[in-house]
Amino acid sequence: MKPLRKAVLPVAGLGTRFLPATKATAKEMLPVVDKPLIQYAIEEARAAGIEQFCLITGRGKTAIVEHFDIAFELEAVLRERGKTEAMALLEGTQLEPGAIVTVRQQEPLGLGHAIWCARAFIGEDPFAILLPDDLILGETPCVAQLAAVYRETGGNVVAVQDVPREHTNRYGILDIGADDGRLAEVKGLVEKPAPEVAPSTLSIIGRYVLRPEVIAHLSRFERGAGGEVQLTDAMAKMIGKLPFHGLRFEGKRFDCGDKVGFLEAQIAFALKRPELAPKVREFLRHYCPA
Ligand code: UTP
């Protein structure tokens, strides 16, 4: 079995739910506390042993690429002024030269189309997908949990969580077979089903480990829900041909593409920081007296 060394991070969406913030700034550059969403995703993938990254970008997203480059002037000034603490904060932005490549999607035709744009990068290798607006707080990084399952089962593995039935029309939903309460065999997939026809309430969140065979299915450009080329539809074509599992991952997921999810993530991540937590707790009491 080939080891998991590659990750694709689609960042070409329009981010309409965050306008006007996302008019000239990429949604993935919005910070949670002091780190942009994209950096959390790259750090999570690196913690799972992933070494090569492909960002699917679009117009107006160049700041993301700059973020992982050397900031020559800034670093020179910080060195000159002896600001070693500030220098240390840049550590997670410094990757091996050549570790990140970018591909332009040109038109946001859907997540499936975005992944298809990475076909040359993927080649014949298994790969992870991280949607940076899903931010996960937990002991073991979510992609590392998926990678561990992939090493056992091979095939495709997706991170899943239960959602309220009235929300099934926002997610890719699983129809499941054998299920041990942690790992469920996938026997069907539907993108954004109406609550009354959803086969379950187990939804796919923004973390996947997929086999490269998915590209052949995406190449047909079949339009699905919302008129977009849906990744879920292409994945569904592999069911029965390859092992396919949904993992109820350990950790809490925040949907940072949504305003309330983004605000909740700020609080949750700030409360994990010893230097911030007491002050945050104090001001929260002021806004929300018991
Ligand atoms: P979303 O559904 O969150 O869409 O995309 P969006 O455009 O980012 O945000 P809203 O809904 O308009 O506010 C999920 C992920 O897929 C990527 C997005 O960048 C995000 O990471 N995506 C989506 C693409 O890269 N290309 C697409 O054509 C669509």
Image (spheres, helix red, strand yellow):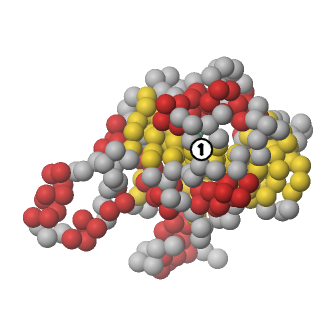
Q: Residue at x 57, y 37 (%)?
A: 124
Residue found 45% across the figure and 47% down from its top: 52
Q: Nearer the viewer, residue 35 or 65?
A: 65
Amino acid carrying label 1: it is Pro
Left-right relation of 279 to 250:
left
Q: Position of residue 146 (x, y in %)?
A: 65, 56
Residue 8 visible: yes
Does residue 148 appear to the left or right of 108 in the view shown?
Answer: right
> If the picture is divided into quarters, which one holds ligand 1?
top right
Tell whether circle 1 marks a residue whose Cβ is less than 8 angstroms from ligand 1: no
Occupied quadrant, residue 101: top left
Q: How many marks?
A: 1
* Residue under the image location 67 percent in, 54 percent down: 150
Is residue 15 something one can see in this rendering? no
| Left or right of residue 110: residue 201 | right
In this picture, is 289 found above or below 164?
A: below
Q: Residue at x 16, y 63 (%)?
A: 78
Which is more toward the observer, 184 or 133? Answer: 184
**Residue 7 picture location, percent across and down:** 52, 46
Residue highlighted by disc 1 = 126
Rendering coords of residue 227 (x, y %) = 67, 21
Q: Quadrant of the C terminus?
A: bottom right
Q: Position of residue 226 (x, y in %)?
A: 69, 25
Residue furthest front as drawn: 1
Q: Is residue 277 left or right of residue 206?
A: left
Q: Which residue is more in the foreground, 232 or 23?
A: 232
In this view, 75 is above or below 226 = below
Location of residue 24 by image quarter: top left
Q: Is residue 22 above or below residue 52?
A: above
Secondary structure of the residue carrying tag 1 is loop
